[in-house]
Image (spheres, grey):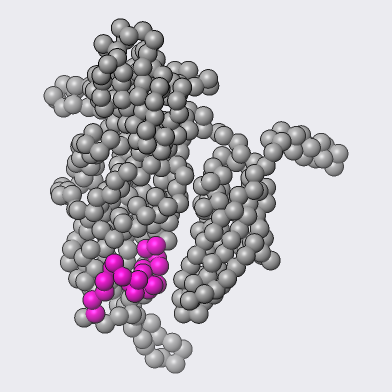
Amino acid sequence: MLKKILVACCLLLSLPLHAVWYEGEGQAMIMNGEVEVARRKAIQEALLNVMYRGGASVRSLQEVRSGILETDSLTVRTNGEIHDFRLLHEKIEDNIITVTISADIFPVNMCSIDDYKKTLFVGPFDIKKLEHAQLGGIYRLGEEIAHRLHRQLSSHSQRFDTRHLMTRAIALGGRHTRDLESQVLEIARTISQDYDVQFVTVGRILDLSHHNEVSTNFLGLSSSERLRNFHIRLMVVDGIRGEIVLRRDYSFQQEWPYDVTLKLDVSGETFWRTHYGQGIEMVIGNMVRDLESELHCKQSLATVVSVFDNQAVINLGYSNGVRKGDKFRLVRRQHLMYQTGQVGGPVFNDDEIVLEVVAVQADRAVLTTHDFADMANLQIRDVLVAVNDIYPHSGMYVEQ
């Protein structure tokens, strides 16, 4: 027993001496009078907002008891010690429940490569089989999903600089996964250069099919229920490195109780208040959480967009967290050439040239170096990485 107490004391002493209380607000629509379900969704949204601000990502929220969020019920990937959660306020108005929660977080930065917000391009989600969208006439569902993903990332995420949204479908062919991914890589490299971003998200709705399921009760009476599938694939590409960094599928099955002739407007709230629409909303929320978790510790790469008067301009600014006096190191990029003649992904090598930020704008920063001869070695599209006390070198690598 004494040993356990000593261990607990040591753990407490090892924590930072100051905790930070964060407040977050969440909302949810009350569907079919199910207040408890809506309350849980609103609390989860509020909790996610708090976690993002405090540097943590929540995988699931399973229990809420007496207004206190139980830490044992959470699966959390975090850069902070979560000490306590409390429900502060709740109100219901116009069939919408709004909650405010507070969380006690000990910040622990476990990802010290850099703290810059990642530049992100949200691309379109096309539908693999358009005939699947005929039921309900939801042909523009991919566009609306991209809109809502972009909106959630822009309003809730503290880790991304979501710069651009494209809802226009990109023509992707090929029957095999390898064909699709090679096209995505090629397109992402072009988007990365054209829109000054590092990460590009694209997706494909793989299944919107439906079927009738017949069930029989204990009296021998049968009933038919129309069920509809939803299966979507999200891919995130580091357009500078030329590699897929996240590939994930999301799917569910939900009742579709509407007449086969009914057409639904996917841009209207009527569709998103359906159980099927609510299911897609949950998928979008899972996408945001996965993006937060998977890309947080990825290295931020800046590219040179202009060189003039012994100064270089990069595509990161104060919106990304760049400040005057920050330092960046040049890394050399070389593309591999295979025996087949195919050009492979780039290889990066450290250079000794270090530049310092002398001026900052929203999405741009001006850098210079004490040795002006180094500027002659800089070219547009060169890559720079942050230099800090913990990682004085870039630590660049290429995943095969």
Place residue 260 in its image quadrant.
Answer: bottom left
Closest to the observer, 39 or 328: 328
**Residue 111, horizontal then vertical, whole percent:** 51, 32
Indicate left or right for 188 with 282 as reference: left
Q: Is residue 153 above or below residue 191?
A: below
User: Can residue 294 be spotted in the picture?
Assistant: no
Which quarter of the rendered picture does the C terminus lie within?
Answer: top left
Residue 375 lies, with reference to residue 340, above or below; the image says above
Q: Is residue 148 above or below residue 326?
A: below
Residue 165: x and y, percent?
A: 28, 49
Taking 249 as reference, is 209 above or below it? below
Q: Looking at the image, which residue is at 23% across and 33% down? A: 193
Residue 88, can we see it?
yes
Give the residue displayed 45% in from the left and 48% down from the top: 157
Q: Quadrant of residue 19?
A: top right
Residue 240 versus residue 195: which sits nearer the camera? 195
Q: Position of residue 355 (x, y in %)?
A: 38, 17
Q: Residue furthest right?
A: 2
Q: Nearer the viewer, residue 223 or 246?
A: 246
- 277 sits to left or right of 20: left
Image quadrant where residue 61 sits: bottom right
**Residue 367 at x, y percent in the picture:** 36, 21
Query: What range is drawn magenta here?
Result: 262-281
Identify the residue at image location x=59%, y=61%.
100
Q: Would you say 151 lies left or right of 138 here?
A: right
Q: Is residue 263 magenta?
A: yes
* Magenta-span inclusion, residue 269: yes
Residue at horizontal 56%, vertical 55%?
24
